[in-house]
Image (spheres, rainbow, N blue to C red):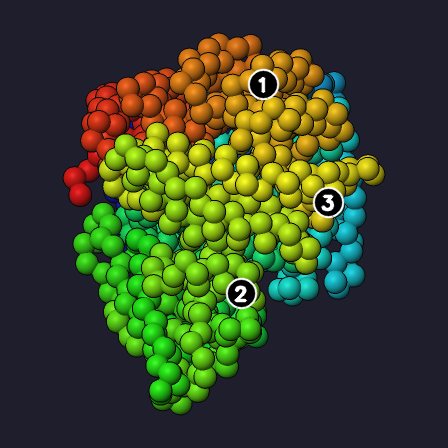
């Protein structure tokens, strides 16, 4: 295991590589415990001076080394498990052949070459290739790979690697066979992949815009072929969309996806050979929910889109991770918006951003979209790099407009194809096409923390003007006590009495392009002229900037926006703001021993939304979801009491369910489907609304609502409705719950991905018995600490999705997570570190819990053999502010 070493890596220390690799020939002879790897590298000096050749390794054993065909004498090199050094290599291009032996069965970290069940597979991002062979394992070394895989035919009938297959055959009389794959596109080592094993395949074809035929193949465990249709359909739609939306065409003759059950992340964009967590491939109406269908579509698209944003143009170094991830998330969000509903997609994305990224940005793990220092790069696959990174790209598009944005993307593809690029080079393309100075905009990449904008508006009837005073601050974050003002694109409207937007003109004659103001100073006042009536400001429409907005908008004005704003995001936001204000008051009241307010106004606003037949069901469903417990905790920000938050929210849900019972029941009945299940967005939206109605009704704990949920559970002909009913029941301590949970397991015991849903539901029950239930479930035959999906389904669900029980006042939730982290860490540090990050917000808790959470973190920190992954998280989490 890699124990902590002294290796902070700094952006400012970046130097181009001394040696480049032109081609890599890999020969891999698969064996469960002793796989032999022979790598032949064509190396050439990068520049004039002949520097030592230093290749990265990790847990490697060298078994052979030749230079231009001759064995290298031992005094000419030093090989450790972590490094191969040739101090004085010839100052010219040469051929180096390296032999290593690795044990895939012992690879529990799931990085490098490992086994998932009977399948051999690889995961090389970020630094896994060095666990296969010695190599300059950095993304700016791009090489052309040819891979020959050899294996027992019985053990691994299917052999895959990147690119196109150029040869295959039997090795006479040995029971072994081989395949040779060639990838003509130079790529960094992190995009290398190979797979071997007993796999079934689903095939299809795609004709690209220039008329080339591409074979599409999805490989899964035999018997799961009938669950690939949605993934295949999503892939074809993604390929077409990238052609139309970005002019990007696929470039190899074959595109392959392999689904494996053991995977640390969601999926991986290896060139031509994406490897997926099977959770994000397999779906059928009986096994997957609408949410699963939606995520599969998005992740299939995300990995496919990486072919251009990540693979053809890759990252110069890992500090530039957002260059591929933020941009590719932006692209998959746009794809989903086009496939489904733009408004619903935007609201869901912003909810995710606030729930994860805002929380990260407000705590000790806060870091810029482009960090400048890391000790373990695996810990920077974060909501900040991915989701805030996507917001930054979206702001670029907002600032320069859609046409210029597309031109800038085109320029980026032309200018940097085949290169390992930087964030500066990316942004320069947009500056060049738009003529705009994006210097200040770069702070979005370098300054961490969520900017807070205070907006104060005032109408002057006599002057017929509306004054909007804006002031921004960016909070201090670790290593960044002082911040400079950001360039904040603020889309806005001034809504007139009749609900229509008033024309926007600044009194000083400056133009407002596309309804977007750009705030660039710490404080700035904008005066709008020709305003004949007092308007209601609708600010940050579409969430044009990832900021926290505080505006002096009254409850009446918010209700007005809820009914009339033509920006659907802000209609939703207005209701969220109303609900948040009420809930925060109620949390304070409950903590002071008082009673919560009932919120009749909110019920009225919500009732009007529910009654509005013009709104899409999926959108209304989002309206019915109140701000989550974590959202409220984030708003409160200090001295947080999760029990009071839970109580306030439960009381309001009960009161809304009660006040709106009539229309909710009506909707529930009206939306009942008769036809067969279809996962399309409209049908999914109807189910989402129907299930949201059911859930709010059940929050009242009325017998008829609970009975309805129990009936829906039994009668459901698809996983969406069955799970929704079960999730609703699981929130209430009623006999129907135990019966349904029991039934669910009995039905699906042999399907691990469905058992995961069962584990998650139980981990999320907001009752004191849950912790013991979760502990007991770790001994259940369906559970395993070795499988990341099982661990995340049970334990991460408890730590991240059950605010109340994870934050038990006695600290037992924190202790359990610390125990589990210590148990997982030696086996799979990435998985352990991710779980450990659940404790990152400890400082905002009320004093009792804060001390207990800190003690749990300190106990983890005290483990002497902690992995670099976990030690990095725990040290940053505990660091003094
Ligand atoms: N690059 C993967 C993505 O598409 C994520 C990933 C990172 C997967 C590291 C595995 C390891 O976002
Ligand atoms: Zn990605």
Location of residue 854 by image quarter? top left
Residue where numbered disc 3 is placed: 683
10 Å neighbourhood of mark 2: few (<14), some, or many (≥20)? many
Residue where numbered disc 1 is placed: 737
Number of the label disc, if any, that sits on residue 283: none
SS assignment at label 3: helix
Q: Earlier in the sequence, mark 2 or mark 1?
A: 2
10 Å neighbourhood of mark 1: few (<14), some, or many (≥20)? many
Residue 637's place in the image compared with 278, above or below, is: below
Location of residue 679 by image quarter? top right
Q: In this rendering, does residue 824 appear at all?
A: yes
Quarter in which the N terminus is drawn: top left
Q: In this rendering, does residue 130 appear at all?
A: no
| Cβ at disc 3 under 8 Å from ligand 1 | no
Location of residue 512 by image quarter? bottom left
Residue where numbered disc 2 is placed: 565
The residue lying at 58 percent from left, 14 percent from top is 735
Q: Position of residue 337 (x, y in %)?
A: 61, 56
Residue 108's place in the image compared with 574, above or below, is: above
The residue lying at 59 percent from left, 53 percent from top is 609
10 Å neighbourhood of mark 3: few (<14), some, or many (≥20)? some
Q: Earlier in the sequence, mark 3 or mark 1?
A: 3
Q: Position of residue 295 (x, y in %)?
A: 60, 42
Which sits in the foreground, 586 or 505? Answer: 586
SS assignment at label 1: helix
The residue lying at 43 percent from left, 29 percent from top is 802
Which sits in the foreground, 389 or 581? Answer: 581
Q: Position of residue 833 (x, y in %)?
A: 36, 31
Which sits in the foreground, 652 or 175? Answer: 652
């Amino acid at each position: 295991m890699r124990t902590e070493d002294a290796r902070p890596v700094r952006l400012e220390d970046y130097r181009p590589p001394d040696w480049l690799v032109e081609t890599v020939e890999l020969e891999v002879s698969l064996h469960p415990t002793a796989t032999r790897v022979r790598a032949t590298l064509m190396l050439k000096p990068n520049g004039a001076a002949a520097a030592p050749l230093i290749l990265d390794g990790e847990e490697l054993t060298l078994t052979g080394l030749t230079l231009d065909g001759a064995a290298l004498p031992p005094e000419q090199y030093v090989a450790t498990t972590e490094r191969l050094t040739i101090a004085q290599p010839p100052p010219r291009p040469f051929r180096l052949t390296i032999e290593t032996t690795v044990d895939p069965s012992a690879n529990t970290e799931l990085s490098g070459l490992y086994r998932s069940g009977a399948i051999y597979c690889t995961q090389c991002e970020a630094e896994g290739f060095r666990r296969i062979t010695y190599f300059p394992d950095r993304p700016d070394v791009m090489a052309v790979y040819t891979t020959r895989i050899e294996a027992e035919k019985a053990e691994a009938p299917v052999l895959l690697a990147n690119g196109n297959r150029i040869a295959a055959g039997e090795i006479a009389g040995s029971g072994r066979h081989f395949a040779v794959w060639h990838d003509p596109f130079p790529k960094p080592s992190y995009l290398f992949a190979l797979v071997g094993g007993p796999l079934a395949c689903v095939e299809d074809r795609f004709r690209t815009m220039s008329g080339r035929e591409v074979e599409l193949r999805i490989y899964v465990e035999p018997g799961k072929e009938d669950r690939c249709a949605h993934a295949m359909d999503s892939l074809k739609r993604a390929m077409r969309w990238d052609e139309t939306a970005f002019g990007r065409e696929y470039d190899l003759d074959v595109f392959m996806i392999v689904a494996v059950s053991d995977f640390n992340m969601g999926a991986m964009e290896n060139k031509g050979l994406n490897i997926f967590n099977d959770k994000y491939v397999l779906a059928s109406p009986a096994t997957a929910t609408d949410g699963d269908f939606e995520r599969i579509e998005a992740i299939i698209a995300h990995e496919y889109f990486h072919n251009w944003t990540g693979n053809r143009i890759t990252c110069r170094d890992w500090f530039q991770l957002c260059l591929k991830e933020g941009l590719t998330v932006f692209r998959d969000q746009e794809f989903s918006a086009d496939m489904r509903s733009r408004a619903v997609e935007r609201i869901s994305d912003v909810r995710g951003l606030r729930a994860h990224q805002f929380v990260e940005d407000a705590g000790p793990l806060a870091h810029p979209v482009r960090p400048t220092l890391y000790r373990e790069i695996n810990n920077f696959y974060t909501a900040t790099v991915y989701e805030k990174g996507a917001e930054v790209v979206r702001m670029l598009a907002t600032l320069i407009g859609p046409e210029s944005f597309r031109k800038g993307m085109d320029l980026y593809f032309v200018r940097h194809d085949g290169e390992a690029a930087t964030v500066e080079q990316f942004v320069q393309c947009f500056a060049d096409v738009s003529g705009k100075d994006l210097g200040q905009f770069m702070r979005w990449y370098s300054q961490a923390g969520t900017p807070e904008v205070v907006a104060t508006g005032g109408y002057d009837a006599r002057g017929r003007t509306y004054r909007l005073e804006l002031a921004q601050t960016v909070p201090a974050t670790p290593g960044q006590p002082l911040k400079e003002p950001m360039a904040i694109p603020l889309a806005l409207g001034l809504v007139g009495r009749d609900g229509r937007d008033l024309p926007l003109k600044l009194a000083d004659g400056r133009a407002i392009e596309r309804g977007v103001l750009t705030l660039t100073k710490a404080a700035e006042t904008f005066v709008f002229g020709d305003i004949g009536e007092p308007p209601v400001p609708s600010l940050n429409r579409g969430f044009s900037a990832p900021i926290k907005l505080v505006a002096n908008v009254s409850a009446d004005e918010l209700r007005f926006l809820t009914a009339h704003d033509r920006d659907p995001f802000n209609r939703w936001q207005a209701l969220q703001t109303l609900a948040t204000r009420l809930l925060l008051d109620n949390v304070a009241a409950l903590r002071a021993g008082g009673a919560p307010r009932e919120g009749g106004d909110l019920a009225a606003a919500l009732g009007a939304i529910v009654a509005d037949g013009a709104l899409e069901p999926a959108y209304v469903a989002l309206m019915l979801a109140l701000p989550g417990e974590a959202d409220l905790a984030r708003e409160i920000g200090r001295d947080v009491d999760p029990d009071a938050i839970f109580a306030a929210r439960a009381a309001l849900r009960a009161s809304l369910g009660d006040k709106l019972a009539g229309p909710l029941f009506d909707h529930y009945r009206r939306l009942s489907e008769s036809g067969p299940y279809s996962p399309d967005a409209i049908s999914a939206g109807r189910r989402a609304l129907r299930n949201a109605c059911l859930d709010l009704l059940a929050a009242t704990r009325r017998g008829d609502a609970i009975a309805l949920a129990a009936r829906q559970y039994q009668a459901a002909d698809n996983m969406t409705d069955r799970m929704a009913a079960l999730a609703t029941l699981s929130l209430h301590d009623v006999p129907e719950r135990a019966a349904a949970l029991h039934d669910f397991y009995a039905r699906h015991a042999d399907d691990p991905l469905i058992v995961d849903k069962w584990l998650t539901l139980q981990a999320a029950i907001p009752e004191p018995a849950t912790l013991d239930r979760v502990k007991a479930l770790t001994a259940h035959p369906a559970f395993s600490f070795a499988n990341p999906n099982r661990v995340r389904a049970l334990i991460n669900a408890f730590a991240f999705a059950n605010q109340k029980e994870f934050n038990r006042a006695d600290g037992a939730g924190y202790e359990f997570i610390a125990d589990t982290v210590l148990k997982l860490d030696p086996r799979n540090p990435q998985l352990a570190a991710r779980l450990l990050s659940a404790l990152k917000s400890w400082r905002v808790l009320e004093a009792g819990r804060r001390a207990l959470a800190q003690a749990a973190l300190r106990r983890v920190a005290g483990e002497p053999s902690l992995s670099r992954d976990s030690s990095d998280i725990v040290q940053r989490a505990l660091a003094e502010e």
